[in-house]
Each structure stands twice: as C-alpha cells, then as structure tokens.
C-alpha cells in the first residue's frame, strides 16, 4: 500500500518540483516532472493491482 | 470581435455531429438486453462493460470539456496554478483504487445503482441517503452546463451567432440518451477518444514546431505573464492552495454520480481496479492540453466573446486551433471538442437522473414504483436536467458556469464521510454523519459566500484566502478541504456523544465488499488491507 502513497506525496508537495531547471527541450522541470509522474502512477497502481489480483 | 465564418470547418463539425448522433441511436442494439425499460439496463448498461469499454466510458466521463477548454484557459489566465489539474488527475487513482473496488462489490451484491442507495443500505438512514442524493444532483447540474460552455466556445469561434446550435445539440443528445441510455455515451466515447488523441498528438507536436519549440513558448509565456505579475512557477504562498486544490479535486471526483455510474457499469471488481492503472494515460493527454494555454499566450491569441473588460477565455483553445491549423484540421478538432462535451453531458444526465428516480422519487413519491416506472422517471428527469443546463448557459455568463463547477467539487466532497468511510467502517453514527454534513456544508457555503472575484461579489472562487479571516498572509486553501475537516470533526465528536442511541440497520455484510463478480470461483475472503 506504500506504493500507492508514493505518487501522492510526489505530486502533492510542490516543494519537490517547483524549479525551472533542469529543463528538457525547453520545458521547465516543474512541468515535465509532473507529466513524468503520470507514467509513475500508472506503474505503481498496476503493481498494486497485479499483487492484489488473486488475494482480495 | 466575431471571427469569419468558415464553411469547411462548419461542414466537418456538422458531419461529425451527425455520425455521432446516428451511433447514439444504434447503441440501443449493442450488448443487447431484452428490454431497456429499467435503470439496470438503461442507466447502467446492464453492468456488463469490460475493461476497454469501462476505460473509454470513465475516461469520457472524467476528462471532459472542462479539461480541454477550462484548464488551458486557467493556465492562460493564471500561469502555473492552472497546472494543478495534472497532480489532481495523478492523485485520484491511487486514492480511489480500493474504495472504488469495494463500492463496486457491495453495489453489485445488493443491486445498488447509486451512492445514496448504498448509504441507505449501509447506515440505515433515509435522511442521510436523501442528503447524499441531493448533494450529488446539485453538484452535477453546473458540470453539465460546463460541457455546453465548451460547445458554445467552439460555436462562437466558428463565427456562428445565436444559441440555436446549442439547442440542436441538446435535442439530439436528449433524443439518443432517451432511447439508448448509458450505451450511447459508452459507444460514442470510442469515437471521441480516438479523435481527441489524434487532435492532441498533432497539437502537441505541430503547434510548438510552428511557434519555434517549447523553449520559445515558455520564454514568451514568462515574459507575458511577468507583465501581469504572474509566473510559470508557483510562488511560496501558492503551495498550499495548489496541493489542496489537487488533493481535494481528486477526493471529490469519484463522489460525483457520473463517476459512480462509470464504476458500477463495469463487469467486475477486477475491471475497476485494472482501470485505475490504465486511466492515467488520459492524464498525460490532459497535461499537454493544459499547455495549450501557454501556446495560446505564445501565439498571441486573443479570446473572442465576453465583454471587453472580462473576455471569455474559454474560447482560447478554439481560437488557437483556428489560427494555427489549416481549416480542415481545425474543423476536426472542433468536432472532437463538441463530441468530447456531449459524452460526459449524457453520462452526467443519466447518473443524476438515476439518483433522482431511485433515491428521491421511489422512496418519497411512489414506494410502489416498478422498475419500468423508475426507468421512465429517470429518462424524463435526464431530459429536464439537460434542459436546465442549457437554460443556465443561455441565460448566464459562461465564466460564471466555471466558477459554479469549482463550487460543485466543494459541495460534493461533503458526502465523503458518509459514502467512503462507510465502505470500511460503521463506527460513525448516522445522525453524527448528518450533523457533520450540515456543519461541513454550512461552513463551505459561508466561506464561498464571503469570497469575491473581479466579476462577482460572492461565490467568486473555490480558493479561500486566509486574509479574509484577518491572517496576514497571501496563502489560499481549497475551501472544500476546510469544510471536509469540519465535517469529519463534527461526525467524530457526535459519534462519541451519541454512541448509545439506536443505530440504523445495516443490510450489508463484510464479505459483500470483497465480491469479485466474475464467474470464476473466488478464494477465501480475507480482511481488507488498509489504504
């Protein structure tokens, strides 16, 4: 279940990511970091789903 | 200033609209049931939707005209704060994964079609169920209205005056929802999403390419925002507002009747859980759509409509497309926005109507109402609700509707203790939950009332400034969170006080929350893990 908390903390605490650099392709860190967590949350929820599939 | 009318764009949008309308009527025959005359079939598609259909349905449900019209408009107008939509749609899936799964199981087991019905069964309180039902319906109407705002923005940018296109959209929408129920938006959602993905893929590559790259976009945006005292990063005093807005919106999202409908219409508990890890794909799209707001700034887009003092910023995305794309592609993009608004509007209308028929009409007006009669009431109410939404849009300023919608989240989150906590525990006393709702709702409404904006003296924004209460800070907080805390405190304290008073009858049993719903045999039930 900690795996579900990880993305929550990662995106709900702006102190972690409210920076301009490093930028990727001109996109400030603030923006690509949060977009990257979209993939992060998909992975986390998928692992939890797979792990709880047969033992509800 | 009204942009020039373009026949090609108009023709493409009309053609796309026509195709979707035909699809809507054809949906009656999809996953066919013997009769659609019940809420089970008309309003929940027979609870037979598999992973893919559920993905498209919930996706079409949650990522609405609000996403592709209002969110970019927010970035356009306020800078970094508008990006809250991205952490919001990331946070929502881990938060609701297990709650949604338990909700699905218990509703499947007892045939509940709405959150209010679950509350009535679980807490044994008709008063609490009624409050949950009314809250859901009230919060949904402005949301439907907002979908129509999206359509209106497109119409305005195409250079068509008057409200008649809205009425035509309304009539078509009402007609196929009437005949096909939830099957119509579920089927149309396929078309909608494919269109939106194509549109966004092209927009996220083509527009930056034309403007000279994200470098140039952010550079120009920085300069433009700085002139207004804004920034593409958050300032220290915005942190709390940003995270509470994201967290609160995430908590509120799955309490809306249309989100509950999306969950309940799926075939099994596993379908629900699997979708929580598949749905974030939409958030990536949302992120790039949000950035269209900056692209609009960089491309020097001027919103059309509204007044000179308060221009209608919801039009910036259509204007951007109009100025950057060739007309034929702009037409497709406009069609995508229109269809993207129709799908959620249909689902919302159906869900709110189900709630009315099941939780207000049946228990309070006609206890003996048959399935067929409830289905019919639901059909009629769904038309009435949409009519109300059109009336709201035609008679009020669109900017007002967006404020309305933000307030919808503040309102709907007050049913969280009754619905979500109820999924795990019966510790809370039913009357304590009622009192908590009253306290939370009262405080929220009061806080909204004293919040003014440039255009409105009251209900100006869902972000509450601590300054209002005399604190010397520029910090803001999402109003709903404060109301929710008050709600929880009152519910908890009163439960301790009322502990001995008789409790309502609980018709559910612990195992009901774990039901898998698939034909395959299930192993021994285990205690649920904490989330």
Image (spheres, coloured by chain):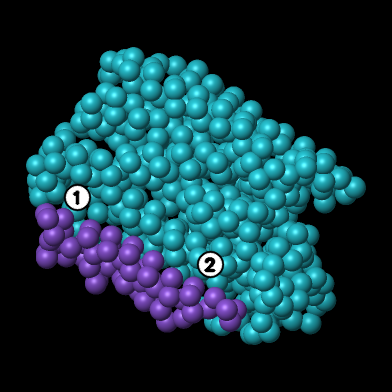
Chain colours: A purple, B cyan
- Residue topped by disc 1: B230
Judge by depth and name the residue closer to the eye, B184 or B510: B184
Residue B273 numbered mark, or none: 2
Above or below, B18 against B525 in this view is: above
Q: Say which residue appears at 51% left-offset and 31% top-offset.
A: B20
Pointer 2 indicates a residue of which chain?
A: B
Residue at the farthest front position: B520
* Disc number lying in front (1 or 2): 2
The chain that hosts pointer 1 is B
> Mark 1–mark 2 contact, CB under 8 Å?
no
Q: In what element is the residue under mark 2?
A: helix
Query: Could you say which is closer to the camera, residue B174 or residue A54?
Result: A54
SS at circle 1:
loop
Indicate the position of residue B275 as horizontal and vertical percent values. Answer: 50, 61
> Relative to residue B85, is residue B325 depicted above or below?
above
| Separation (CA) of disc 1 from disc 2 | 40 Å
């Amino acid at each position: 279940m900690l795996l579900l908390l990880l993305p929550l903390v990662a995106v709900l605490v702006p102190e972690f990511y409210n920076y301009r650099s490093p930028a990727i392709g001109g996109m400030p860190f603030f923006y690509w970091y949060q977009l990257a967590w979209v993939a992060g949350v998909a992975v986390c929820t998928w692992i939890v789903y797979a792990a709880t599939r047969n033992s509800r | 200033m009204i942009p020039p009318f373009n026949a090609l764009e108009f023709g493409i949008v009309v053609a796309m609209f026509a195709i979707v309308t035909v699809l809507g009527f054809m949906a009656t025959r999809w996953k066919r049931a013997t009769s659609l005359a019940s809420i089970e079939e008309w309003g929940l598609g027979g609870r037979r939707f598999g992973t893919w259909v559920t993905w498209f349905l919930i996706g079409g449900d949650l990522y609405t005209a609000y996403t592709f019209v209002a969110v970019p408009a927010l970035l356009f107008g306020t800078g970094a704060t508008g990006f809250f939509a991205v952490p919001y749609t990331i946070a929502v899936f881990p938060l609701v994964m297990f709650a949604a799964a338990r909700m699905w199981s218990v509703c499947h087991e007892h045939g509940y079609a709405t959150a209010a019905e679950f509350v009535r069964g679980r807490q044994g309180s008709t008063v609490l169920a009624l409050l949950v039902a009314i809250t859901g319906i009230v919060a949904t109407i402005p949301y439907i209205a907002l979908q129509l705002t999206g359509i209106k923005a497109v119409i305005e940018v195409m250079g068509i005056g008057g409200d008649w296109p809205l009425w035509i959209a309304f009539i078509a929408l009402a007609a196929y929802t009437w005949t096909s129920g939830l099957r119509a938006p579920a089927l149309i959602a396929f078309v909608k999403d494919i269109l939106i993905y194509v549109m966004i893929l092209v927009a996220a590559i083509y527009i930056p390419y034309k403007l000279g790259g994200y470098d140039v976009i952010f550079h120009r945006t920085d300069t433009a925002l700085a002139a207004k005292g804004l920034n593409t990063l958050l300032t220290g005093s915005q942190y709390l507002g940003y995270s509470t807005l994201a967290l609160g919106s995430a908590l509120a999202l799955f309490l809306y009747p249309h989100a509950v409908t999306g969950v309940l219409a799926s075939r099994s508990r596993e379908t629900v859980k699997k979708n929580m890890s598949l749905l974030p794909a939409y958030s990536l799209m949302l992120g790039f759509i949000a950035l269209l707001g900056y692209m609009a700034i960089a491309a020097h887009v001027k919103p059309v409509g509204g007044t000179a003092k308060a221009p209608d910023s919801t039009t910036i995305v259509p204007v951007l497309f109009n100025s950057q794309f060739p007309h034929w592609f702009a037409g497709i993009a406009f069609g995508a926005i229109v269809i993207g608004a129709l799908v959620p509007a249909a689902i919302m209308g159906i869900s709110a109507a189900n709630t009315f028929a099941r939780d207000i009409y049946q228990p309070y007006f006609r206890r003996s109402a048959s399935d067929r009669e409830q289905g019919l009431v639901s059909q009629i109410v769904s038309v009435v609700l949409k009519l109300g939404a059109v009336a709201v849009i035609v008679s009020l300023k669109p900017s007002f509707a967006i404020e309305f919608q933000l307030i919808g989240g503040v309102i709907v989150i007050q049913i969280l203790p009754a619905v979500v906590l109820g999924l795990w525990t019966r510790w809370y006393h039913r009357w304590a939950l009622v009192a908590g709702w009253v306290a939370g709702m009262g405080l929220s409404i009061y806080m909204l009332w004293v919040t003014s904006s440039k255009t409105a003296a009251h209900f100006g924004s869902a972000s509450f400034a601590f300054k209002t209460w005399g604190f010397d800070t520029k910090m803001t907080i999402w109003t709903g969170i404060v109301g929710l805390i008050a709600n929880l405190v009152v519910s908890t304290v009163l439960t301790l006080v009322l502990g001995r008073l008789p409790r309502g009858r609980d018709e559910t049993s612990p195992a009901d929350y774990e039901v898998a719903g698939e034909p395959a045999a299930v192993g021994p039930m285990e205690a649920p893990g904490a989330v």
